[in-house]
Amino acid sequence: EPGSLKARLCVEGLELSYKYFEEKGIPYKRCGKLIIATSEEELPRLDKLYQRGIANGVKDLVYLEVEEFKKIEPHCTGVRAIHSPHTGIVDWGLVAT
């Protein structure tokens, strides 16, 4: 839910996590994430996700049309996507040690 503790901590924790990884020399990659609607029927759900992300303060969240998301991931198929460019990956087992 927008404004919930979980939502606030998720957005706040993103930058704190990247800062921690830098300080501790933990490898990570800001690779971004695509959330793709694979059919017209999924577009209302995609829109709800987008609106929730905006309400929660997710930075730089954008809609991408097919031609745009195929530049990021050419093998994906769908009708529209949300791109979250600041999403990343890390080895959480390494973080926990």
Image (tube, rainbow, N blue to C red):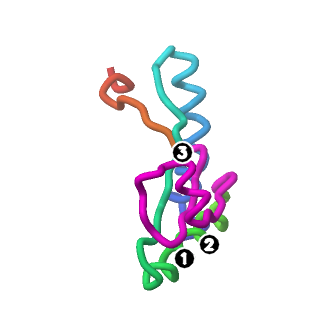
Left or right placement of residue 33 versus residue 92 in this view: right
| Residue at point 57%, 76% (across, down) | 47
**Residue 32 numbered mark, or none:** 3
Snapshot quadrant of residue 14: top right
Magenta residues, start to end: 58-86
Do the residues bearing badges 2 and 1 touch, measured as CB atoms within 8 Å? yes
Quarter location, residue 76: bottom left
Q: Amino acid at mark 2?
A: Gln
Q: Which residue is mark 1?
A: 48
Name the residue type under label 3: Gly
Of residue 52 and residue 8, the one placed in the foreground of this image is 52
- Look at the image and say whether residue 53 sits in the magenta stretch: no
Query: How many discs appear?
Result: 3
Residue at the disc numbered 2: 51
Against 16, residue 39 (above or below) is below
| N-term mark: 3 or 2 | 3
Q: Residue at 59% x, 43% y: name it.
A: 86
- Nearer the camera: disc 1 or disc 3: 3
Q: Quadrant of residue 67?
A: bottom right
Across and down, in percent, residue 90 comes to: 41, 31
Taking the spot 47% from the left edge, 51% from the top edge, the residue there is 74
Residue 71: image x %, image y %?
A: 57, 50
| Residue 70 image point, x, y percent | 53, 55
Q: Nearer the viewer, residue 18 or 69?
A: 69
Q: Does 71 lie within the magenta span?
A: yes
**60 left or right, relative to 75:** right
Amino acid type, callout 1? Lys
